[in-house]
Amino acid sequence: MVEIPPDVDLVAALQHEVVVRVSFLSDNADEFPVDIDFQYLFAAGEALFIYDVLLNLDVEIEYIWAVLSPRKRPVKITAVLFSLMYLVQRYLPLFDQIILNQYFILGASTKRACMITYAMCGWVSLAGISLSEIILVIRIWAVWGWKPLIGVILVVISVAGGIPGIFFLSRFLNGIQYPELDIPGVSEQLQRCFYMTTNKEIVVTWILLMVYDMVGFILMAIPGISAYRSSGSSNLVKVVYRDGVIYYALIFMISLINVIVILILSPDLRLLLSGFERVLHSILASRVILHIRKMASQDNIHGQTPTSTGIMLTTIEFTSFTGTENGFTANMNYRSFELEVPQQTRA
């Protein structure tokens, strides 16, 4: 049974995206607001995503899609797998937005359809964010010279953060209720989902992501400081470290704001920034990779080795580090990290 305030035109309010609180006759009445429509905010995220794709499409075709060309020989399995992983995380937001548009605009027809739609949005978003993080984790391991110890540390923090994150996301999704309004003259005009939840456990997932990104920031900054001192003239080295550090700093700040929103604002606003942050993960991770590959193809790097297939293997030397009483200093003991990028055509 639902109690609607007499001065509220429910249909008009929902159609114009106004928050309508429905008081359920229970002890938890104040904790059960009906869903607020985030259509405009998701539309902003979608517009930003499409704009970024169009803005960088030429670079992506040249440095990502070219690796997948069937005419390229020999085939580098690692380069192909990395490019495929990049493309999946890059374009998964399109799938997210298709689901959200179906949910917000067309409206699911049944309670079960609403539940499936929300669950798919949650799990696909988690998959996309995870792929974006994995791509940057690979870069962290690379700048540390593929040291086994760093690899173990990265795997441990990934598992330690990922498993609890999946658990709490599952609990959050399972705790969502989907009420069906049975109001004469109103229900027939509303083709959309509503949700109710007092569950804040989604915040644990975002906090774990914050901790994960903070560790990534530290692991990228430590070698980056010495790299700037010893190889400051290399634009590629600057891009590798600078972009990685900026990525983790931005994502950490966005996650922090998201956590504050979840903890402070009312239940109907808990997911206010989640979709937008998910899109930013894809955009920022993609920018990092594209920028590195673009810089790696230019003349200011060393070790360019053209091959007969028109593909250039660029060796980037990363300094390994030893601890001293003053912190980390470069001992110029180099390890190699290969990037496969298309060779530039020269006039």
Image (spheres, rainbow, N blue to C red):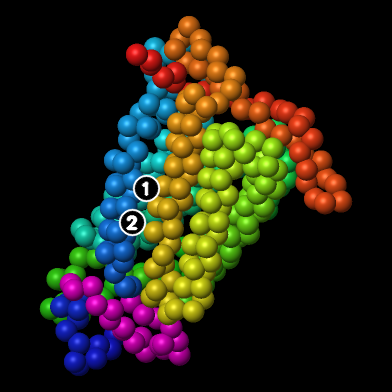
Q: The disc labelled 1 sits on which kind of residue?
A: Pro
Q: Is residue 333 visible?
A: yes
Q: Is label 1 or label 2 in front?
A: 2
What x and y, as percent, mark residue 313?
Answer: 55, 19
Proximity of marks 1 and 2: CB atoms separated by less than 8 Å: yes
What x and y, as percent, mark residue 28?
Answer: 45, 86
What x and y, as percent, mark residue 177?
Answer: 40, 70
Circle on res. 45: 2
Residue topped by disc 1: 93
Q: Which residues are magenta?
A: 15-34
Q: For this rendering, which residue is in front, 138 or 326?
A: 326
Answer few, some or many: residues within 10 Å of disc 1's Cα (few below 14, many 20 plus, some between 14 and 19): many
Was residue 21 drawn as part of the magenta stretch in this picture? yes
Residue found at the far right of this picture: 325
Q: Quick one: quadrant of the N terminus? A: bottom left
Query: Where is residue 347, by image quadrant?
Result: top left
- Give the residue displayed 61% in from the left and 27% down from the top: 316
Task: Give the mark nearer the N terminus: 1 vs 2.
Answer: 2
Magenta-drawn stretch, dominant element (helix, strand or loop): loop
Q: Real-space Cα distance between discs 1 and 2? A: 9 Å
Was residue 152 drawn as part of the magenta stretch in this picture? no
Task: Name above or below for residue 347 compared with residue 286.
Answer: above
Q: Is residue 163 visible?
A: no
SS under mark 2: helix
- Give the residue displayed 28% in from the left and 89% down from the top: 3
SS under mark 1: helix
Q: The disc labelled 2 sits on which kind of residue?
A: Gly
